[in-house]
Amino acid sequence: MARLRIGVEQLGADGLRVELDRASGDTDVIELAPGGGIRGRYEQDDESIGLRSIRAESLVVAELAWSWSTGRVTGSLRLRDVEIEAAIAIGPHREGRPSFVGSIRARGVDGQVELRLGQTTWTAGGLELGDFELTASETGTITLRVGQASASTLRARLGAAGRVELEASGLSLPEGLALEGGGLRLERAKVGELRAFVGDLS
């Protein structure tokens, strides 16, 4: 089985876009904007893409769209002081096993994202995260921990039909948040303004 191994410095200079189809019909996308100061190795064979000992002072994800068993995230982000060690399954090997296994750590993350968990969709603008750490195990368990978080706007649509919406501005989570087993946990939140919208209940 042939394996491609190259340094990521050239990929960093030119940018990189990966598109991977899923059986559900969704397409997973990661697009990195060109940038310098990236170190590490990119490996690829018939089964997976490997990101080995990736380090970067700054990494701009121009487009992100990724699904897992309990949700999907889309958006664009900038990561600072980044460390990545991961394997991404490709081709037929994406079915029946986790499509992403590894860890992503960053001192800071900012941007905008939409996160779908079950029947709830969260949309955050002006997002800022500190001490970001995401790990994905070979059993499919996703764990996300953030030391501090804030967003200029946050909207939640609840239920399959989105009949209830919550909209917050000036949101701050001084003790961060955690995503474990498909559930989102917050210790404490400060909100500048909170509004609720309820659809036709008839």
Image: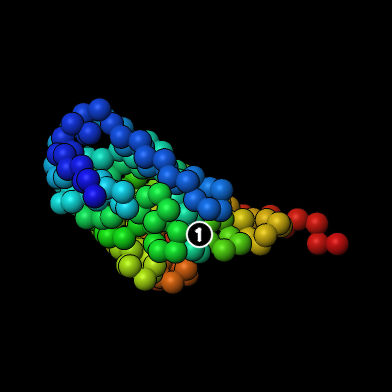
Percent of width and height locating residue 80: 23, 45
159 is higher (above) or lower (below) than 47: below
Instruction: Kindly identify the residue that appears in the image at 28 percent across and 31 percent down.
Output: 15
SS of the residue at dot 1?
Answer: strand
Relative horizontal placement of residue 196, taking residue 151 as reference (left or right): right
Instruction: Kindly identify the residue that appears in the image at 20 percent across and 42 percent down.
Output: 4
Relative horizontal placement of residue 176, taking residue 190 as reference (left or right): left
Please state the total of marks drawn on the protein image: 1
Which residue corresponds to mark 1?
A: 71
Q: Nearer the viewer, residue 156 or 87?
A: 87
Q: Nearer the viewer, residue 154 or 65?
A: 65
Percent of width and height locating residue 128: 35, 49
Percent of width and height locating residue 92: 42, 53
Q: Which residue is most to the front?
A: 1
Q: Amino acid at mark 1?
A: Gly
Specify the color scheme: rainbow
Instruction: Kindly identify the residue that appears in the image at 47 percent across and 46 percent down.
Output: 21
Q: Which residue is most to the top?
A: 14
> Is residue 107 at all visible to an observer of this figure?
no
Q: Quadrant of residue 197?
A: bottom right
Neighbours of disc 1 within 10 Å: few (<14), some (14-19), many (20+): some
37 is higher (above) or lower (below) than 136: above
> Is residue 97 at all visible to an observer of this figure?
yes
Percent of width and height locating residue 45: 27, 47
Relative horizontal placement of residue 169, taking residue 172 as reference (left or right): right
Instruction: Kindly identify the residue that appears in the image at 86 percent across and 62 percent down.
Output: 202
Q: Quadrant of residue 110?
A: top left
